[in-house]
Amino acid sequence: MIGSLRRRGAENAEKTQREWKSSLLAPFCETSAISAPLRTQRKRRESGKTPFWPLSAKPPRFLRLCGELQPIIQLMAPPIDLSKLNICFLAGTLGQGGAERQLFYILKTLRQNGARLRLLSLTRGEFWEEPIKELGVQVCWVGESSSRLMRLKRITNEVNKDRPGVIQSQHSFTNLYAALAGRALGVRSIGAIRTDGKREVQYLGRVAGRLSLRLPHSIAANSKFGIRNAEGLGTAPSRLHLLRNFVDTDYFTPSLRAFSGGVNVAAIGRLKEQKRFDRFLRVMARVDKIESRLGRTIKATITGAGPLKKQLERQAAELGLLGRVVEFKGNLADTRAVYRWADLLVLTSDREGTPNVALEAMATGLPVAATCVGDLPEIIKDGETGLLAEPENEDRMTDNLLKLIRDARLRVTYGLRAREFIVANHSLALAPRLLQHFYQAALQ
């Protein structure tokens, strides 16, 4: 009797272990292979038994812990030789954006360390194309057709011309192209998470969004927040790897400016919904109303272009800010002039990964007042290098701005600490070592 119970227990344990392994391996398998563990879990659910890992639930706690420890695991792994890498990158655009600047930094570092590189782009003639060509990297336009199938065919043909070891997507919306071309040619693929993971899925749609996270062999995320969200969407932690954003701290440097009676506030970013420049304008209206009573002059600039420009200009005019307090700058090829002019940077976004503008501002010695979204709490230490507020709390944002506006000594103190943090954690000088460990973990 006891022996029978033991055998039955051992069989059940073995069955549970098989289902667990199937759940872990599902993201790596073809669709037909994924269906088996799905059917098993469905049968257990219908019979009243609880699946070991329900598809609607988060991965087990110890697997989430593996994702949180991923950066440490990357640093502990033996570094790969960058000169032996042969990578074909795929970009959705080469315009003036944060992902494109990071692509330039990555290509520059890999090129300097002897890697073989090639870049395929869905667009041409944009801001970063010439600087990338000047690195000695071949840039090939693959976006002639508006058909996704034709684009995939063109991308696959271009990759096949010089079989690389890796095809790496720089934007989340090009993940599927890279993954499908890689699988067709037997080339390892790396996808990207550039914001918070959830935003990528919403933008691409439920099916395409989830496939964009599951089909690439590995995913490079620029924030821990994005990794956690991707895990919550069912992506195996072992496939998610942190590739932090870099900033050239020799290019973005502090500058001395004479203190005057006024304070200059900068906001930088693409004029689209998630950046919430409408919130910035409302907060600035509050600040201006309070400070003008005390005879203080506040000036603000919004640097960037985007679909909401006219709407934001109308809002600024209605609030009595346009021209008098707030000026719209448009896109600038070199944003250092804005950082030199400004006394502080403000970010009012609803969603972020690790925003470049925060890193650049901090590198130039500016304090940052921001919303605590994405990995902003990781890089801005509230009350040490800047000030944070919940996205919905405009009262707190107003108080934070007033605190920084009224205390020049505090701005300098926060700015110096911010610069020290960026140099120690996000400087481009760290890129070779961090890329070595990233590729070692992503390609193992």
Image (cartoon, helix red, strand yellow):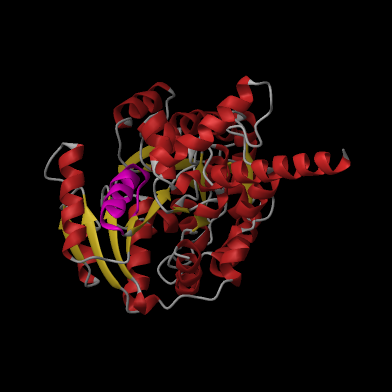
| Residue at position x 49%, y 36% in the image | 36
Q: In the drawing, does residue 242 fall left or right of residue 131?
A: right
Q: Is residue 148 above or below residue 364?
A: above
Q: Quadrant of the N terminus?
A: top right
Decide whether the magenta segment is chiefly helix, strand or loop.
Answer: helix
The region drawn magenta spans 169-186
| Residue at position x 37%, y 52% in the image | 99
**Residue in the foreground of this view, choosing between 280 and 77:** 77
**Residue in the foreground of this view, choosing between 190 and 93:** 190
Q: In the drawing, does residue 351 fall left or right of residue 409?
A: left
Residue 178 lies within the magenta run: yes
**Residue in the foreground of this view, choosing between 20 and 314:** 20
Q: Residue furthest left?
A: 144
**Residue in the foreground of this view, choosing between 17 and 356:** 17
Q: Residue furthest front?
A: 1
Q: Is residue 416 visible?
A: no
In the picture, residue 340 is in which quadrant? bottom left
Q: Is residue 230 visible?
A: yes
x then y, percent, for residue 427: 49, 68
Q: In the drawing, does residue 123 fall left or right of residue 372?
A: left
Count of labels in the image: 0
x then y, percent, for residue 54: 61, 32
x then y, percent, for residue 3: 84, 44
Residue 324 lies within the magenta run: no
x then y, percent, for residue 205: 38, 29
| Residue at position x 47%, y 72% in the image | 436
In the picture, residue 252 is in which quadrant? bottom left
| Residue at position x 88%, y 41% in the image | 2
